């Protein structure tokens, strides 16, 4: 049996490792609808940690990873199985709302209750450092008059958030036939940026956080930040609004809970999350992760989500991603 | 010589007690995770990330731990490939081709030793490359556009044809099934669901590790069940528990070639370890399979893909660190962790955080040595696994497979999918269809398609873009030469055989 001993040790280890992904049972649970390591996972783990640190929940917040269908698997589970569970919060972001707008979730946007957004990654429009395009003005002019002459790219597919917010800029700049602009999907913002440095594409639309290193190194130039205020870490980059293009494109990070959770419990979550948002702990953690802390909560946030879903659905129809 | 002083500084970082302890822990658990079917480096790294947060390690220590796990997995993946014909992780698929036949012939210890040394050599070549050329190589890799990646995948698929099986039509069929499965899920370009049957679990496509465990482990169990009535004959004997070191020396050229090919594949951010091991194996087969011994237990067929996959894993760290572009699923997870630790990988990482980069590089050197030292004495132990009767071994394999797959996603659907793949694998094996091309189609098909479609989006539908760059033209010339050579060799062999038949 000496031979079998290592095998069973291995097996025990697999069990231990498998279980270590989730903490011991506790009062609240945060589901990250992705594998460990991504943005949703960060949302749950960080918010879970700070909720405990601030004594807003009893004990630890259990973080569960439930990947599948860009969040659709979790959405279906919450709607069907735990619509009234006040202990459950789920991480979501602009990406989730895009999926809903394009009908890729099993239930519409009002099937759950949106609690709050606590931070956002800011969308930017970037070109290579030796690109002839010098300003957002020049870019929108090219997009409006000769959209076929440039190739644009980002980390989402056609109709994804990177694409949609670029089209919002293009439409504001005077492009009417949105489908004329060429769009190339890459697996991430840095993939798109390096391909731009290699000369394959001309313009990248993506989140600032991921590509900030290339701005520091001078390999790329940011034409505009799609935010209300300049990005704190890059105060010199002008916003699109300051250049006459009234578009914001945040990739916000937030949370939802079940659709049948009572008003009292919903309000309790919103107020707890607001406390968390205002804490030093969250402000530090968010900035370290490359986010700009931004608060929208409760009814205000619900309205924002619905409005965003509508804009996304409109543009998706315009470019033919949905009927 | 600046590099060497930086590296010396890196060793000072790596040689703190905490970092050495994490390194050894990572190497050991990585080897186990890699060896377990169902748990691969992606899961290993992903599972350990919460731990690094929980213990509050700094970025350097976390990265050392995760890289050690990553490298350990690459060593470990070969163990179950060789002993059980079940690849422990994706890149270890190629090692089953000659590793398992060697074990069947009682040469398990040799196969483990050869692959261990090859892994060490491949990984070391990659780390040396990382030390000397990282930023420069990364700057070159950015000129590899979508059309060039597509050409590279074409080359890889053409070489698969020569890999496995007696009947090339069955190889082709198997690869096509793999490619078809790779198309399931949300279309990455347009977001439209394909072959998902309105099931949200299929939106992300088929997880390669689920398919892999099903095809190899579950089908193996089914094969065993079939013969359960007639108990397996005496366990396979072992010629020796100690490896024959002359055998290792004989594979030196295969190791060298595999390392170089694998490293190149690793440095390209769109390729990765699986492509590295495939290319290494098929190049080696083409270069040195004079007597048709590949696929029947040729030590070089074990050495080349293992050197290749380890060199590719090391190479993949180059685009991750110096561009922030992950070359594989595992490096993608590591990248996400770095960002959440407030480290911004990218062009300035080497200047801004030399302690982190060089501490990591130094710990990779140490980790490789540790893995070799850790692995060689375990050969005796592991090769004795061959003597465990299958009725005792297989239930454990089954349990580990189920637990492994479930622990990744907490999804019962994945378990069902795994069983479906098990049945598919069983049927195909009954029909004498090799499973390796299927897995490769599944592993490489998605990236191949994405790059083709990216190229077409860039050119607005003009196919000429595929032949527009010197890189892609070179790759197509290589592909044509490879095809020509294979056909010529096949024809020559047939003629010789006919000549022999007529003489006889």
Image (spheres, rainbow, N blue to C red):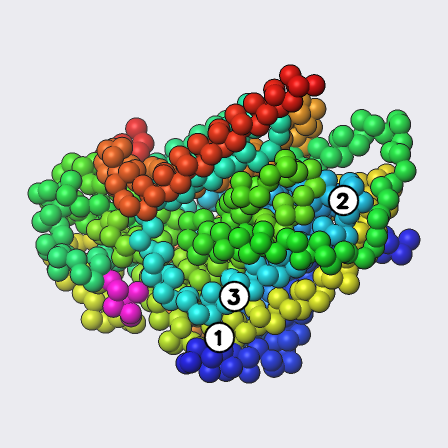
Q: Do labels 3 and 2 share a chain?
A: yes
Image spot of residue B77 (x, y percent):
65, 51
Image spot of residue B171 (x, y percent):
56, 28
The chain carrying label 2 is: B
Query: What's the residue at 74%, 52% (across, down)?
Result: B110
Q: Quick one: SS at disc 2?
A: helix
| Mark 1–mark 3 distance (CA, rounded to whole Å) | 11 Å
Q: Are marks 1 and 3 on the same chain?
A: yes
Q: Can residue B142 be seen in this view?
A: yes
Image spot of residue B319 (x, y percent):
42, 60
Image spot of residue B405 (x, y percent):
65, 44
Q: Nearer the viewer, residue B304 or A183?
A: B304
* In front: label 2 or label 1: 2
Residue B165 to residue B139: above or below: above
- Residue with the mark numbered 3: B127
Magenta residues, as a range?
Answer: A214-220
Residue B152 forms part of the magenta stretch: no
| Mark 2–mark 1 distance (CA, rounded to whole Å) | 39 Å
Residue B183 to residue B35: above or below: above
The chain carrying label 1 is: B
**Which residue of the protein is positioned furthest toward the top in this rendering?**
B502
The chain carrying label 3 is: B
- Residue with the mark numbered 2: B103
Decide which of tag 2 and tag 1 comes sooner along the chain: 2
Does residue B198 appear left or right of residue A144 in this picture?
A: right
- Residue with the mark numbered 1: B358
């Amino acid at each position: 049996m000496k031979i079998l001993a290592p095998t069973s040790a291995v097996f025990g280890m697999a069990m231990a490792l498998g279980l270590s992904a989730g903490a011991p049972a506790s009062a609240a649970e945060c589901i990250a609808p992705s594998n460990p390591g991504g943005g949703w996972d960060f949302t749950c783990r960080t918010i879970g940690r700070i909720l405990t640190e601030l004594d807003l929940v009893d004990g630890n917040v259990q973080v569960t990873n439930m990947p599948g269908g860009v969040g659709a698997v979790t959405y279906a589970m919450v709607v069907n199985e735990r619509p009234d569970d006040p202990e459950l919060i789920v991480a979501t972001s602009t990406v989730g709302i895009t999926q809903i707008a394009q009908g890729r979730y099993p239930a519409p946007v009002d099937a759950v209750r949106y609690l709050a957004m606590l931070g956002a990654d800011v969308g930017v429009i970037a070109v290579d450092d030796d690109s002839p395009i010098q300003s957002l003005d020049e870019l929108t002019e090219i997009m409006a008059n000769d959209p076929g002459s440039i190739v644009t790219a980002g980390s989402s597919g056609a109709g994804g958030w990177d694409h949609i917010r670029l089209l919002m800029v293009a439409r504001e700049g005077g492009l009417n036939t949105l489908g004329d602009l060429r769009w190339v999907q890459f697996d991430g913002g840095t993939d798109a940026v390096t391909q731009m440095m290699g000369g394959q594409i001309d313009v990248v639309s993506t989140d600032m956080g991921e590509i900030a290193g290339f701005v520091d190194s001078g390999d790329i130039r940011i034409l505009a930040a799609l935010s209300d205020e300049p990005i704190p870490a890059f105060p010199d980059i002008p916003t699109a609004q300051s250049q006459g293009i009234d578009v914001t494109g945040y990739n916000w990070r937030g949370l939802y809970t079940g659709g049948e959770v009572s008003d009292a419990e919903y309000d309790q979550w919103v107020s707890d999350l607001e406390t968390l948002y205002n804490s030093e702990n969250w402000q530090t953690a968010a900035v370290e992760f490359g986010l700009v802390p931004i608060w929208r909560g409760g009814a205000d946030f619900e309205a924002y989500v619905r409005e965003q879903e509508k804009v996304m659905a409109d543009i998706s129809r315009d470019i033919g991603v949905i009927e | 010589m600046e590099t060497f002083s930086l590296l010396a500084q890196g060793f000072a970082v790596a040689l703190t007690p905490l970092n050495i302890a994490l390194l050894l822990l990572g190497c050991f658990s990585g080897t186990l995770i890699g060896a377990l079917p169902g748990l691969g480096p992606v899961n290993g790294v992903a599972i350990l990330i919460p731990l690094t947060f929980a213990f509050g390690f700094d970025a350097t220590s976390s990265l050392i731990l995760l890289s050690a796990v990553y490298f350990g997995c690459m060593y470990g993946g070969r163990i179950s490939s060789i002993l059980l014909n079940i690849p422990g992780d994706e890149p270890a698929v190629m090692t089953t081709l000659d590793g398992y036949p060697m074990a069947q012939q009682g040469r398990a210890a040799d196969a483990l030793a050869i692959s261990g040394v090859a892994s060490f050599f491949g990984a070391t070549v990659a780390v040396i490359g990382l030390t000397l050329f990282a930023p420069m190589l990364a700057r070159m890799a950015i000129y590899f556009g979508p059309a060039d990646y597509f050409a590279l995948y074409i080359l890889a698929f053409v070489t698969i044809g020569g890999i496995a099986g007696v009947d090339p039509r069955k190889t082709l069929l198997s690869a096509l099934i793999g490619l078809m499965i790779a198309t399931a899920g949300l279309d990455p370009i347009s977001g439209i669901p394909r072959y998902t049957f309105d099931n949200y679990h299929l939106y992300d496509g088929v997880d390669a590790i689920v398919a892999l465990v099903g095809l190899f482990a579950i089908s193996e169990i089914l094969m065993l069940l079939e013969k359960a009535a007639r108990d397996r004959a005496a366990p396979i004997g072992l010629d020796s528990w100690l490896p024959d070191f002359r055998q290792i020396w004989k594979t030196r050229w295969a190791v060298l070639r595999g390392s170089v090919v694998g490293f190149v594949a690793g440095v390209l951010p769109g390729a990765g370890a699986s492509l590295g091991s495939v290319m290494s194996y098929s190049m080696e087969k083409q270069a040195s399979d004079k007597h048709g011994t590949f696929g029947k237990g040729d030590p070089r067929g074990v050495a080349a893909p293992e050197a290749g996959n380890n060199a590719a894993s090391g190479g993949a760290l180059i685009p991750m660190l110096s561009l922030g572009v992950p070359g594989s699923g595992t490096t993608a997870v590591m990248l996400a962790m770095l960002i959440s630790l407030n480290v911004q990988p990218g062009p300035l990482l080497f200047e801004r955080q030399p302690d982190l980069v060089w501490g990591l590089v130094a710990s990779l050197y140490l980790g490789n040595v540790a893995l070799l030292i850790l692995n060689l004495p375990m050969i005796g132990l592991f090769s004795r696994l061959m003597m465990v009767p299958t009725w005792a071994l297989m239930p454990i394999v089954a349990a580990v497979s189920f637990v492994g797959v479930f622990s990744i996603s907490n999804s019962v659907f994945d378990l069902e999918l795994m069983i479906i793949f098990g049945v598919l694998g069983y049927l195909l094996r009954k029909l004498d269809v090799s499973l390796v091309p299927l897995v490769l189609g599944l592993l490489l098909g998605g990236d191949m398609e994405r790059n083709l479609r990216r190229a077409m989006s860039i050119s607005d539908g003009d196919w000429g873009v595929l032949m527009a760059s010197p890189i892609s033209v070179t790759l197509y010339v290589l592909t044509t030469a490879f095809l020509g050579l294979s056909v010529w060799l096949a024809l020559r062999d047939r003629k010789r055989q006919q000549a022999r038949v007529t003489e006889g």
